[in-house]
Each structure stands twice: as C-alpha cells, then as structure tokens.
Image (cartoon, rainbow, N blue to C red):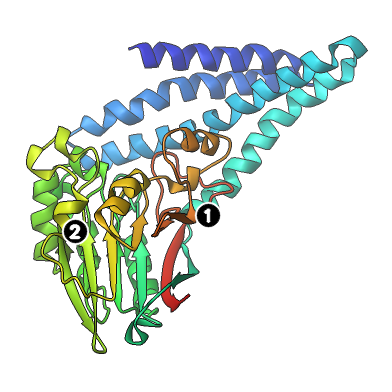
Amino acid sequence: MFAIWLSALLHLYIGWRIAPELPAAWEGWALAAALVASAILIPLAFFGRRSRNRARADRFTWAGMLALGAFSMLLPLTLLRDVVLLLAWPWHIEALARWSAAAVPLAALAIVTIGFVNARRTARVREVALPMAGLPPALHGFTIAQISDLHVGPTIKRPYLQRVVDAVNALHADAVAVTGDLVDGRVADLAPHVAPLAALRSTHGTFFVTGNHEYYSGANEWIAELRRLGVHVLLNEHVVLRHGGAQLVLAGVADTSAHHFDPQHKSDPQRALRGAPADAGLRVLLAHQPRSAEAAAQAGFDVQLSGHTHGGQYWPWSLLVRLQQPYTAGLHRLRQLRIYTSRGTGYWGPPLRFLAPSEITRLTLVGA
C-alpha cells in the first residue's frame, strides 16, 4: 500500500508542477487525466497478473508497464525542470516556466517512443574480442554467443524469442550461453513461449545459469523444462569442451540470491570448478550477476560472462545501477579475470530502452 500511495503522491506532484503552466487549458486537463489513468494502471499491472485469465492479465501488464514507462520519464524531467527554475529564479525569466512546462511532456513522449522501438526490436549483434594471455592456438577464434535477461513473460512472447534464436543461429557460434533471467512467470504459462530455445544451434551446445527471476518463477520447474528442451543447465558445476585438441572448462553458478529460495543452490564458483582439468586452456564462468566476479577470481576463472544489469535499461535510472553492481556493461578486468556484462537481450518492466541498447553478444577468444 505504501508504494501505491507514494506513486499517487508523485503523480500529484507532476500534475501540480506542470499542468497549470501549460499554454492551453485543455492541455493541462489532458495531462491531469493521463496522470490519473497512470496512477491507476501502474498498480493494476502488478495486481492484475494474479488474474486466472492470462490474456486479461497480459493486457493489464501491457497497459500498466506503458504507463510506468511514461511516468518514469515525467518524474525526473519534472524534477530537472524544478532545479532549472530554482537556479534561474534570481533572473525572473517568466517565459522559462511556460515553455519548460510544455517541454517536459513532449520530451517524455519522445523518449518513451524511441525507447519503445529500441526495446521491441530484435537486439543487434555486438562483437566483442576477448584477448587472453597464454590462449592455446586451438582456442583462438573460439566464439560464444551470449544472450541474457530476455524476461519472457507478459509482454515478451514466443515471436520475440524466435527472432532472437534465429539471429543467434546465424552466428554459427561454438557455444551459446544464456546468463539468466530468461523468464518472468511459471512453466505452466510460458513453456510454449520458451520452446524456441530447443532450436538453438552451436558446435558444443547451449548452456544456462539461473538468474534471480528464475527463483521468483519456480526455478526447479524451469531447470527441468530447459533440460527437456536440450539446454545444459550448469548449477554450480562445469563441463569440459574439447575443441581442436584443446580443453575449455565452461562452468556456471546459480544466482547470488539463490540460497534465499533453495539452500542447495547457493552460488559457489569454487564448487563449480571442482574436478576440472588443471591443464585446461581456459576457464569460463557463467554467472548472472557481475557481483560474482570477486569469488570467480578467487576460484581461478579466466573469464566471467554476466548480465542482470540491463546496462541500466533507460536513463536516468541507469545511473542507479552503479550503486548495486560493480560493473554495469561491457568488458572489465579484475586481476586475472576478464568480466563481460551484457546489456541484456530483452527488457524488464516498461518496454523501454534508452541509451542502453539490447544486445546479442558474440565473444571471440583471441591471444593477447
């Protein structure tokens, strides 16, 4: 209830600061009506998901998430406008209040429109070279196609995932890595929409690790379903890929929050590497959250592939991600460990991506 009241007060703040300053009275009333609708639709998106009618629940979610996207743009822009007006107050620039009030909803609409197109399009392929010292010649050019944070659920369905699968298959990768947060919902509701994963093709197969959203959605049921589809689920364990006479250890850990849902799934990079050949040419860890990097470095991994952050998904809320994760997006290094954090292939919540494009990543191993 607190969140609902807070949302209502913030909607009221936007209306109070913007609507009276709009040039035409009808514009002010239109904005006020839109804000009232938004204040109702946003909580309805979350509560409406409990409906037994899945089509109705999805419609509630679509409407509420679109409203949330618009609101999450209007709020920071209104705050920014108030800061500008405060700084300009000594100069008594009366026109500034009027034109800036009109600029806020127009800018929000433009950002939401661009962000919606960016979110709903098929993620583009991002090419990333991973320079590794001492890489065996047989592993030079080895490619991993990474997808992450698809969040198949109320607004992302089978056609969206099918386009991603087709794009990944066109890369002819040596291995495919799915680094968590694949789903937002139960197997009973979403199994047909996740089925295209069975069609992923690569030299050595498709490998998956759990993200935090799998644990909100019934992780054990999803693990069983993915294995049924032919996906290799790495739950604090590893496989040895033999490639051109060299060995590559590919390991995976459960999400760092997994132990809160199932103590047997406690994330453990040391356990994931246990028993791996000491002379392997490379040790790669799939870990949903970048914060696994310190434990991965201590365990002796060379590469960690992660997601979770969505690269912030959209400005300005992207600025808050740095407070929660050590790496937001891209390639970083922690001692001997190379960490790549994907911006994600789908989105969560509002169908909105702004200044944080989605990606399908092709990582290529090269000698340093």
Residue nearest the viewer, comparing 55 with 75: 75
Q: Is residue 26 visible in the rendered structure shown here?
A: no
Instruction: Identify residue type, mark 2.
Output: Pro
Q: Is residue 117 visible in the rendered structure shown here?
A: yes
Residue nearest the viewer, comparing 4 with 246: 246
Q: Is residue 267 left or right of residue 43?
A: left
Location of residue 14 by image quarter: top right
Q: Is residue 179 left or right of residue 71?
A: left
Badge 2 marks a residue whose secondary structure is helix
- Report the residue marked by disc 2: 192
Residue nearest the viewer, comparing 280 with 93: 280
Location of residue 21 by image quarter: top right
**Count of marks placed on residues:** 2
Residue nearest the viewer, comparing 368 with 72: 368
Q: Is residue 55 left or right of residue 259?
A: right
At label 2, counting other C-alpha atoms closer than 10 Å, the crowd grade (few under 14, some 14-19, many 20 or more) is: few
Q: Is residue 288 above or below residue 67?
A: below
Instruction: Identify residue type, mark 1.
Output: Pro
Residue 357 image label: 1
Q: Is residue 211 left or right of residue 7?
A: left
Work out how far the residue at label 1 is from the one at label 2, CA to CA, in angstroms.
Answer: 27 Å
Tell me the residue at 16%/57% (across/down). Answer: 272
Badge 1 marks a residue whose secondary structure is loop
What is the x, y in percent for residue 164? 37, 66
What is the x, y in percent for residue 141? 40, 82
The quadrant the N terminus occupies is top left
What is the x, y in percent for residue 37? 48, 23
At label 1, counting other C-alpha atoms closer than 10 Å, the crowd grade (few under 14, some 14-19, many 20 or more) is: many
Choose the circle earlier in sequence order: 1 or 2. Answer: 2
Tell me the residue at 9%/37% (across/down). Answer: 263
Tell me the residue at 44%/78% (across/down). Answer: 367
What is the x, y in percent for residue 308? 36, 46
